[in-house]
Amino acid sequence: MKSILYIFIALILLFPAGLLAQQENAPVEELLDRLSVSSEDHEAELLAEEVWARFFSSGSPSVDLILQRGIDAQSSGNLELAGDFFSDVIEFAPDFAEGWNRRAALEYARGEYTAAAEDLGMAIELQPRHFGALVGLGLVFERLGSATGAFQAYSDALAIHPFLSQAQEGVDRLSKQVEGRQL
């Protein structure tokens, strides 16, 4: 009887660790698939953290370092330096969606909405399920006066990450404006 109890306890203790190891090794597309069907906020947040970790990994330690330096420069208010770093990331790794997404966020902060939309378009072309870039696109469309475009971008983000509060707030905010309009 004791041995069965010990096996049961061992299985309970090892099962979550096995799931975590499985999640850490899962490709981003698999994580995005799981995120899109998650039914609990907590589960979605854990999956989203793993997805963001994949989004932030270019495969090159040098490019990842430049990206981080750009994020740090932007956080400290040095937008010009941040822009230089993000442009370097794009130059060295043009197929890295997060470089485009980060530069778009900087352009948005500067009020350069058209440039932000172009960079977000590249990010989404490279990673069509980049829910952060889709929310960014929704914000840009709102600034440019396109409620329909913004609503669609937020809705697309929610299809990928059903608990993404910023996207849900955008859909809620714009739903009355686009009701009755064909998307």
Image (spheres, rainbow, N blue to C red):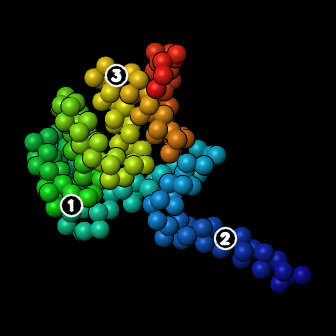
Q: Which residue is mark 2?
A: 15
Task: Look at discs 1 and 3 and give the one toward the viewer.
Answer: 3
Labels 3 and 2 touching (C-beta < 8 A)? no
- Which mark is drawn over residue 172? none
Q: Amino acid at mark 2?
A: Phe
Q: Amino acid at mark 1?
A: Ala
Residue 56 as seen in the image, left or right of residue 87: right
Residue at horizontal 34%, vertical 36%? 136
Q: Residues within 10 Å of mark 2 (few under 14, many from 20)?
A: few
Residue at horizontal 52%, vertical 61%? 30
Q: Position of residue 83 (x, y in %)?
A: 14, 45
Q: Which residue is mark 1?
A: 93
Q: Where does the N terminus fall, quadrant-wise?
A: bottom right
Task: Look at discs 3 and 2 and give the one toward the viewer.
Answer: 3
Q: Nearer the viewer, residue 178 or 166?
A: 178
Q: Position of residue 174 (x, y in %)?
A: 45, 20
Does residue 75 sit above or below 166 in this rendering?
Answer: below
Q: Position of residue 151 (x, y in %)?
A: 44, 27
Instruction: Tell me the element at label 3.
Output: loop
Of labels 1 and 2, earlier in sequence is 2
Q: Position of residue 118 (x, y in %)?
A: 23, 39
Q: CA distance from mark 3 to mark 2?
A: 47 Å
Q: CA distance from mark 1 to mark 2?
A: 38 Å
Residue 158 as seen in the image, left or right of residue 145: right
Q: CA distance from mark 1 to mark 3?
A: 31 Å
Q: Which residue is mark 3?
A: 146
